[in-house]
Image (spheres, helix red, strand yellow):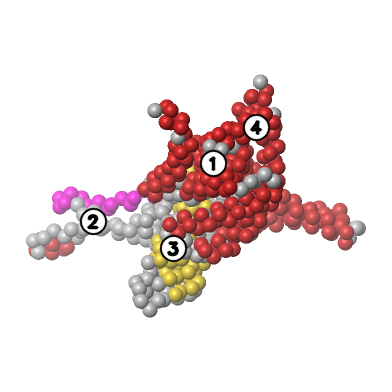
Amino acid sequence: MRSLILRTLNAPLFILLVALGAAVQSSLFNSYPLWYFQPDLILIAVIWCALRRTFTQGGILTLIFAGIAETHSSAPAGFFLCIYMTIFLGIRVFSRFFVISQFASLLIVTIGSAIAWKLLVLAFLVAFDRASAQFFHFLITVLPFAAIEGLMGYWLFKALDHFDRTTTQSETSRQLIEDELLVEEGL
Amino acid sequence: MIKYLKEYRFYITLFLFLLIPVIALDTSTRAPRDYRFYDRVILAVTSPIQTAISWSLEQAVDLTQGYLYLWNVKSQNTHLFEENRKLLGQIASLKEAENENVRLREILNFQEKMKLESIIARVIAKDVSTEFRAVRLNRGENAGIKKGMAVITYEGVVGRVLRTTATTSDVVTILDLLSAVDAVGERSRARGVVEGLTDELCQMKFTLRTDDIQPGDFLLSSGLGGIFPRGVAVGTVSKVKKKQFGISQEIEVKPAVDFTKLEEVMVVLNQKVEVIEKPIEPKTAKAEKASDKNGKTEKTAGAKPAGKTPRVPKPKKVAEPAPPPGGTE
């Protein structure tokens, strides 16, 4: 019973953690020049969803996380939804061709996703005709962003793994999720 | 039907995951987004944390400045340590208080000078992405802040309120890619729209190529659009690039406000409505005669039909005491 309750609480708690993470991130990195080293905790959560959740659950969580990002930004509605969903689907596709089993490979995916995130933002801004001088901004910020994302990922993925083990409790339940994932994607 | 739904469940879900963001993006380009119910729930949870973190950081800086400095003094002078510790501690806290007082006094002076009804708010958070440059303030609807209000400091224009909750408000700064402020050159009166460009610079658009604008020129808000009060500093022209052909010129603007040190801001609650009409004096008998001779009645704003006592038009209701008759900005 306890494990069932914990498993049910997994998703709401995950959402709450991400919301708190976004709040901490935006206020802790509020001052200059710290804002150039602001990590994107939501991106890490999206990567986790893409690799450790089923397609449907991960997708819904990604949409919710993108909504949280939009409440903390002046970006037009739907902007982050598009970007995070693209990242989510991209990682799902990537994980079908490459095995991401080790922690190190997870970090490589995170760094790659951070660069892809920046490129996507740039591409969307070009589409909105708001990209003047943004290419230079991209060049300045992309490497610190990827580095800080990788660094944060190292700790956060461990924490998320611990969180998932605590809330889903048993190895059997994890196996069930993985089986469901394989069936859904026709493997 | 259910069989097909089950069979193509993956593709249907994929289609929905792609469709939802696109619809959201499409609707946002048609109408600006306000906070929805669930956004408010998220903010109710997160904004106290942002306020707490912002406060804690401030306290940590105070402590570091006060205490660590004293720690060095201790190693240098053991005899005067106790006295120095107390005095320097006081100095550190007084200095911080003095700095805050100076900032607040400057805001107050500016407030009085500009005759604005405004409230002071503190910046508690920044945008989650570095591409967009919004800030969050610690005051919202409860303090009278509404969407679209101007946010300024004694240095100049900060931005406008994008969204509000009961206790917080989001401000799009003039550095943001989606902001636009109508500005006018102080020297040449050349007009243009100042938009965000980078973390430190803005660009002035739609200024005619023939307009006289030079590096160093000071730009002020024109008051057009009704959001920003007229005459507030927007920035200084830092670079002008005139092409040989084309309608407009490329102008880079350094904002008047130092966004790296932005702590307190003023939200303009109500712009004073300037009385631009001169109170009309009752017509003299001579003037009336002259107008009768021409067979025409001179039409003047506020003039009353003959036979009735002419009245001085009442100035519009203002927040501040009315200026002397005939007094304009």
Q: Which mark, residue B301?
A: 2
Q: Chain of mark 2?
A: B
Q: Chain of mark 3?
A: B
Q: CA distance from mark 1 to mark 3?
A: 35 Å
Q: Are marks 3 and 2 in contact (CB under 8 Å)?
A: no
Q: Residue furthest right?
A: B79
Q: Chain of mark 1?
A: A
Q: Quadrant of residue B259?
A: bottom right
- Label 4 or label 2, whichever lies nearer to me, is 4
Q: Are marks 1 and 3 on the same chain?
A: no
Q: Quadrant of residue A183?
A: top right
Q: Is residue B4 left or right of residue B200?
A: left
The amino acid sitting under disc 1 is: Thr
**Residue B264's spot in the image, x, y percent?**
57, 53
Residue beneath label 1, please?
Answer: A62
Is label 4 in a helix, a strand or a loop? helix
Q: Nearer the viewer, residue B16 or B165?
A: B16
Whether residue B34 is visible to the viewer of this picture, yes or no, is no
Position of the N terminus of chain B by quadrant: top left
Residue beneath label 4, please?
Answer: A175
Q: Are marks 4 and 2 on the same chain?
A: no
Q: Is residue B38 left or right of residue B49?
A: left
Q: Is residue B32 left or right of residue B261?
A: left
Residue beneath label 3, please?
Answer: B194
Is label 1 in a helix, a strand or a loop? helix
Relative to residue B54, is residue B275 depicted above or below? Answer: below
- Label 1 or label 4, whichever lies nearer to me, is 4
Q: Nearer the viewer, residue A156 or B43?
A: A156
**Residue B44's spot in the image, x, y percent?**
55, 37
